[in-house]
Amino acid sequence: MNKALAIEGGSPAKTGPYTRLPHYGEEELKELREALEQGTLFYAQGRKVYALEEAFAEWVGAKHAVACSSGTASIHTALMAAGISPGDEVIVSPITDLGSVVPILFQGAVPVFADLDPRNYTMDPSSVEENIGPKTKAVLAVHLWGNTCDLDALKDICDRRGLILIEDCAQAWGATYKRRKAGTVGRIGCYSLNEFKHIACGDGGLVCTDDDVLARRLRLATDKGYNREAGAAIRNPTFLAANYRMTELQGAVAKAQLLKVDDIVARRRRWIGELMARTADFPNILPPIPTHGCDPSWWFYMFRAAPGCDADKIAEALQAEGVPVWAHYIGQCVYEYRLFTDHLAFEHGGHAYQARVYGKGIAPVAEDILRDAIILPLHEDFTDRDLDETVEAFIKVGNWEGAKRV
Ligand SMILES: Cc1ncc(COP(=O)(O)O)c(C=O)c1O
């Protein structure tokens, strides 16, 4: 093995780029052609979106599913259907995509940020409970990196305190918690089909629920409140809703992609399982520990620089070895964005979140996670050679004296 670190003049462990094959193929083309040949791209007149919803409901293990235009839209749809209203508080993770948080503001509600578990990076149930106040209405459980939150604990809290549990599964296609698919433990599960998720259709989303009343409201929330059920008064909405409809083109691609998701997740699990088994024990690296009861689906691999080590140095040394990691994930907690610290959501007028102070210190564990975090993007097409060379890079950098903080 080549021992000298590339950052110190040795040869890189990686001898070529990681393998990634095209995401879309003949299956998607066939579905697209059929969608166009229907003569309509409108979901309510076509078959692709409805077929996707049926297939997704069966795959995820829920009674109902409704498609929509993005993951962000799926979360907003869930909040609208759940009746989240101005002044309500929704507890959410400080490490997530803005798409988890912006919909809370759109409802006039206030995002409240819970702290995280240091090793699985999901919401710490005790911090969730501490953040519940008289205005709290919902908990949005963000399943980061394909690993679910501690759903038994969150469900128990929500049941005891009369709150709605909504699951953000954008990064968790195929993840299971105690054998149930992510999105089926809470009242509503929300999925993203954006270009970079396990499966994709450019942009798109899906929501699922077992509740018949919520299911009807989810549909209305995506379709301006227009009720397209036979015999209903179509244009007389009973709550404020958006146009988050999915088109037949998105539905066609997503339908073909859904057939591939189990294989995609299985291949990711195998690759990362090997990587973790072979890189478990290095002084400079703290691997993640999945939530007890969860079989993660590995959207990315996020590990931490060990205490006393510097994430930037480790990331730089791995990059020199040809491993395309980056440090600090989203850089800072969502509540440190100026949108929150300076309450910039609207040009003028009042919004309930203006009464809340946001800024450094709200979630100290989450801030430490981001200081130490290093992310390796994953792809199901990574080969055994990619694996061997990544392991070699981790062996070099994981034991490197130069990774220490000065
Ligand atoms: C955890 C999480 N929630 C929500 C979203 C929003 O999804 P979309 O980009 O489809 O709106 C994302 C997207 O990256 C995400 O990672």
Image: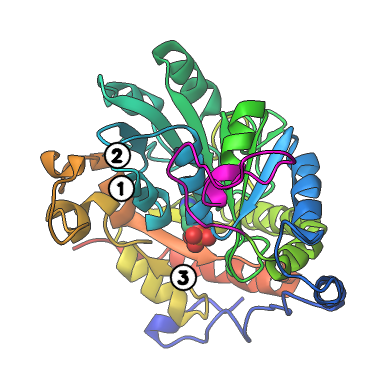
Q: Is residue 370 visible?
A: yes
Residue 326 vertical placement versus 156 (above, below): below
- The answer to whether the residue bearing label 1 lies less than 8 angstroms from the nearest atom of ligand 1 is no
| Residue closest to the eye, 338 or 227 | 227
| Identity of the residue drawn at 19% across and 40% down | 352
Whether the magenta-drawn stretch holds residue 67 is answered as no
Residue 306 vertical placement versus 84 (above, below): below
Name the secondary structure under disc 2: loop
What percent of the width, then of the height, locates residue 334?
29, 53
- What residue would you read off at disc 3? 325
Quarter containing the C terminus: bottom left
| Identity of the residue drawn at 37% across and 26% down | 137
Circle nearer the viewer, 3 or 1: 1
Name the secondary structure under disc 3: loop
Q: Is residue 302 visible?
A: no
What percent of the width, then of the height, locates residue 51?
81, 53
| Residue closest to the eye, 18 or 310 | 18
Q: As drawn, is 60 to the left or to the right of 291?
A: right
Residue range (magenta): 219-245
